[in-house]
Amino acid sequence: MYPNPEVARYINENFEPVRVHVLEHRDEYKRLGERYDAQWTPTILILDSDGEERHRIEGFLPVDDFLSQLTLGLARSAFQRQDFAEAERLYRGIVNRFPSTDAAAESLYWAGVSRYKATDDANALRDTAASFQGRYQDTTWAKKASVWE
């Protein structure tokens, strides 16, 4: 389904992929499209075990951007389960492995929030705000973190 071997391996190792093709599975596509408000293809949904959407990727992306978005979905799922240590690990992994992607600044922000939620130590937020001084300073995520300085 995914021509890039790294992407295919990552998906198979971390997800239970389900493919619903707009032409080949018309009825299922219509049913799921309505349930999840899928307006465009491809739409990649990362769902939790209850079928609740945790992250959405719409349209095609280059490999690093796609992998970072998939990892962002895993991190959001961990955060939702209140597995803050795992969420922080995944968010920091995005920042370290995919620093030039759109997901990196958002991940830096949520890594700090995850550490704060795990430890109740406000230094986690201050440290995160300081991290934005060196990179991603022109992003919305830096603005959001600025209140923690």
Image: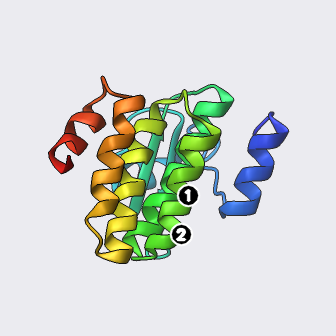
Q: Is residue 146 left or right of residue 26?
A: left
Residue 100 quadrant = top right
Q: In the image, what residue type sits under mark 2?
A: Glu
Q: Is residue 126 left or right of residue 119?
A: left
Q: Is residue 77 left or right of residue 64?
A: left
In the picture of the structure, the residue carrying the numbered disc 1 is 90
In percent of width and height, residue 114 lies at 38, 64
Q: Is residue 146 left or right of residue 132?
A: left
Q: Is residue 51 visible?
A: no
Q: Where is 21 relative to 135, above or below?
A: below
In percent of width and height, residue 89 lies at 56, 61
Distance from Cα at disc 1 to Cα at disc 2: 6 Å
Q: Residue at x 41, y 59 (%)?
A: 54
Q: Residue at x 49, y 59 (%)?
A: 75
Q: Residue at x 56, y 33 (%)?
A: 99
Q: In the image, what residue type sits under mark 1?
A: Leu
Instruction: Report the residue that reaches farthest toward the left.
Output: 147
Q: Residue at x 46, y 30 (%)?
A: 102
In what element is the residue under mark 2? helix
In percent of width and height, residue 111 lies at 42, 55
In the picture of the structure, the residue carrying the numbered disc 2 is 86
Q: Decide which of 119, 23 is in the foreground and name it.
A: 119
Q: Where is 132 relative to 19, above or below?
A: above
Local packing at callout 1 (Cα closer than 10 Å; few below 14, some 14-19, many 20+) is many
Disc 1 + disc 2, Cβ < 8 Å = yes
Q: Is residue 85 visible?
A: yes
In what element is the residue under mark 1? helix
